Amino acid sequence: MKTSNAQPDSHSPLQSLEEWEDFLKARYPEPGTTPAQPFQATDPEKKKAEFRNYEADARPTVREFYRQNHRHQTYEFALAKRKELLTLNRRKMGVWEAAEYLNLLVDDSDPDTDLSQLEHLLQTAEHIRADGQPRWFILAGFVHDLGKILCLWGEPQWAVVGDTFPTGCRYSDKIVFPQYFADNPDSQDSRYQSPLGIYEEGCGLDRVQLSWGHDEYIYYVTKDYLPAEALYMLRYHSFYPWHREGEYQPLTNARDREMLQWVQKFNPYDLYTKSHTKPDVKALRPFYEDLIAEYFPTKLKW
Ligand SMILES: [Fe+2]
Ligand SMILES: [Fe+2]
């Protein structure tokens, strides 16, 4: 199944979902590596200039993707998608089965050099395992992107991937391409434009309606089975304005602030462990089947 489409008005502007992740990697270079242009976080003016460069260097497909995402991800939309998709009455699948199902998502990227969805999951999980992390952490790595199956059910790319952000309150200017929010109807709605919007200070992220995507979906599918730390990783791994930019603190509660470290611990495995060395799916399968069985029932509701 193709996820891409060259039509300019298509809801699949990205040639592959990885285009978005590659952009994130350029925007958030791995700490300790030298980005193409030196990044001086100590100089706020410089930081601003570099930030603009990431946007300027973005591919037109990525730009179009963000334009659609920022325009269509309203508070009402996020609410409606939760209602529609969190009923989990579409399929019953085991976790490995879901990973194989997700692998049906084939895009226009080069199959010889790019990883399949299953390979990305295994690569993430294998790095976590190699670092001697707990078993639930490895499993979080394996399941973290399974929510991308939403693409197989006809959801547009902008409603599956993209850095997430709170709806129902003012947009942080640290969100990439903030100018595209001008086309979001919520930006004309005064209820949603104060710093806290419809929320109370310290209400906790659980009460905050983030833009809809694959994070919230996989959180919901797995929430009865994994430890809280893993669930934070899954639910907020794309919430870069919070875990990388430190924004939206007033919405968080003590538990969110305590759990943030786990989301941050997870992020490098997701973003920086991609290599073209393909994991041996067949050889790894028994280990992951055992791990899955340790935490999950044979079938989960999707
Ligand atoms: Fe993801
Ligand atoms: Fe990922």
Image (tube, rainbow, N blue to C red):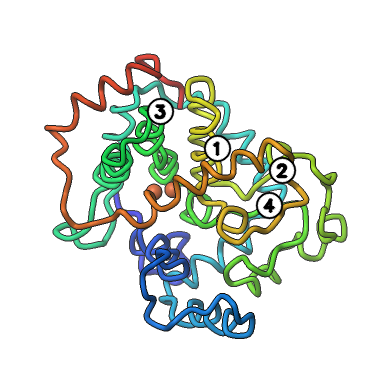
Number of the label disc, if any, that sits on residue 142:
none
Q: Which residue is mark 4?
A: 166
Q: Which residue is mark 1?
A: 232
N-term mark: 2 or 1: 2
Element type at marker 3?
A: helix
Q: Which residue is mark 2?
A: 208
- Dots 2 and 3: beta carbons under 8 Å? no
N-term mark: 1 or 3: 3
Residue 104 shows up from this direction: no
Total marks shown come to 4
Element type at marker 1?
A: helix
Circle 2 crowding by C-alpha within 10 Å: few under 14, some 14–19, many from 20: some
Residue at 37% in and 81% down = 36
N-term mark: 4 or 2: 4
Q: Quadrant of residue 216?
A: top right
Q: Position of residue 238 (x, y in %)?
A: 52, 51
Q: Which residue is mark 3?
A: 136
- Dots 4 and 2: beta carbons under 8 Å? yes
Q: Nearer the viewer, residue 265 or 187?
A: 265
Circle 3 crowding by C-alpha within 10 Å: few under 14, some 14–19, many from 20: some
